[in-house]
């Protein structure tokens, strides 16, 4: 079976592609490999995927509607789409806010338009974010909670994607599942994420900035658990009216950022240089995922605590950066 996968050179996309290929799927990867972070990392991920039979790659921007529509037409027998391409990051919106509207809103629309033309399509799974919960304080975050108070532009664009997907499910019967990812980490991760940038700072002996003295809490979710949840949902299309749903996918465990730093120090064998700062308005105090719904649907059971996942990340980090 052919799976169309956007964001194939990205962190989550790379791991999802590997899992799909391992179970014998044909994966058509799509990515523009933009320079938001080190393109060499994206190219290395693609290099690993290219070794596997069944992987085909197209370097294109999802906002290029003609190119995307043409590709989907050429792959019209595809039965599933996994849409992970996005402009990531919360604080980068202060630098280039337009890229979020272009990729996360206009690009999402392009994928919806292309997908609804696939006559054999059974399911479109797309990436949303825990950021949509915004300023909510009732924990754990549940799918039925209010999500109309975003505290970042990134969150607003991700919620916009959910609403557009609902409209397409209603109007065209396009079966979709949106996954609200909670702080994904692990090998081959994104250098802009806190765990990765902290590791680099510890190695380079440069300061780490901790907001509110590291008391902010996050639901850190290991990449292998994420992949298991994505594939489990992909295999179970919604059958409601309209055929759509939005699910949390997280570790169901909230831990202080200070704990993350301590685990990195232990795994790297060095102490961090810490600088404290007030919490920016774009940063929420805590994230914590309710995962009952995805557990009931797909048997999702996160199995990797932070104390196990961070050493695995550090082992890869050392190899990637050529550290002894």
Image (spheres, helix red, strand yellow):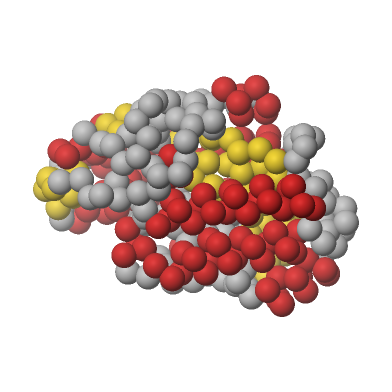
Residue at left offset 15%, top offset 38% = 213
Viewer-proximal residue, 184 or 273?
A: 184
In the image, is 208 to the left or to the right of 187? left
Q: Position of residue 217 (x, y in %)?
A: 30, 33
Q: How many marks?
A: 0
Viewer-proximal residue, 139 or 5?
A: 139
Q: Is residue 219 above or below residue 23?
A: above
Residue at left offset 61%, top offset 60% = 108
Q: Position of residue 119 (x, y in %)?
A: 88, 56
Specify the quadrant of the image occupied by residue 256: top left
Viewer-proximal residue, 231 or 87?
A: 87
In the image, is 181 to the left or to the right of 138? right
Q: Is residue 40 above or below residue 5?
A: below
Q: Position of residue 167 (x, y in %)?
A: 68, 51
Residue at left offset 20%, top offset 37% = 214
In the image, is 178 to the left or to the right of 270? right
Q: Position of residue 140 (x, y in %)?
A: 42, 26
Q: Is residue 259 visible?
A: yes
Specify the quadrant of the image occupied by residue 218: top left
Q: Is residue 25 visible?
A: no
């Amino acid at each position: 079976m052919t799976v169309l996968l956007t964001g194939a050179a990205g962190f989550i996309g790379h791991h999802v592609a590997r899992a799909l290929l391992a179970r014998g799927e044909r994966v058509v990867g799509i990515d523009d490999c933009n320079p938001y972070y080190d393109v060499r990392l994206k190219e290395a991920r693609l290099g690993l995927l290219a070794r596997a039979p069944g992987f085909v790659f197209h370097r294109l921007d999802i906002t290029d509607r003609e190119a995307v529509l043409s590709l989907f037409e050429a792959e019209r027998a595809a039965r599933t789409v996994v849409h992970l391409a996005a402009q990531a990051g919360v604080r980068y919106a202060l630098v280039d806010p337009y890229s979020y509207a272009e990729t996360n809103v206009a690009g999402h629309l392009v994928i919806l338009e292309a997908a609804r033309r696939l006559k054999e399509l059974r399911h479109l799974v797309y990436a949303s974010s825990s950021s949509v919960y915004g300023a909510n304080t009732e924990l754990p975050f549940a799918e039925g909670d209010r999500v109309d108070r975003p505290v970042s532009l990134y969150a607003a664009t991700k919620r916009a994607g959910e609403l557009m997907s609902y409209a397409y499910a209603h109007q065209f019967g396009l079966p979709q599942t949106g996954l609200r990812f909670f702080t994904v980490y692990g090998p081959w991760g994104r250098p802009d994420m806190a765990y990765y940038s902290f590791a680099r700072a510890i190695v380079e002996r440069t300061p780490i900035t901790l907001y509110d003295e590291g008391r902010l809490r996050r639901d850190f979710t290991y990449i292998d658990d994420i992949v298991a949840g994505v594939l489990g949902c992909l295999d179970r299309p919604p059958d409601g009216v309209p055929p759509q749903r939005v699910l949390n996918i997280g570790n169901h465990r909230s831990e202080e950022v200070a704990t993350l730093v301590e685990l990195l120090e232990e795994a790297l064998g060095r102490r961090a240089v810490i600088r404290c700062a007030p919490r920016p308005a774009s940063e929420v105090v805590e994230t914590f995922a309710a995962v009952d719904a995805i557990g009931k649907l797909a048997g999702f059971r996160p199995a990797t605590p932070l104390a196990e996942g961070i050493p695995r990340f550090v082992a890869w980090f050392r190899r990637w950066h050529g550290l002894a």
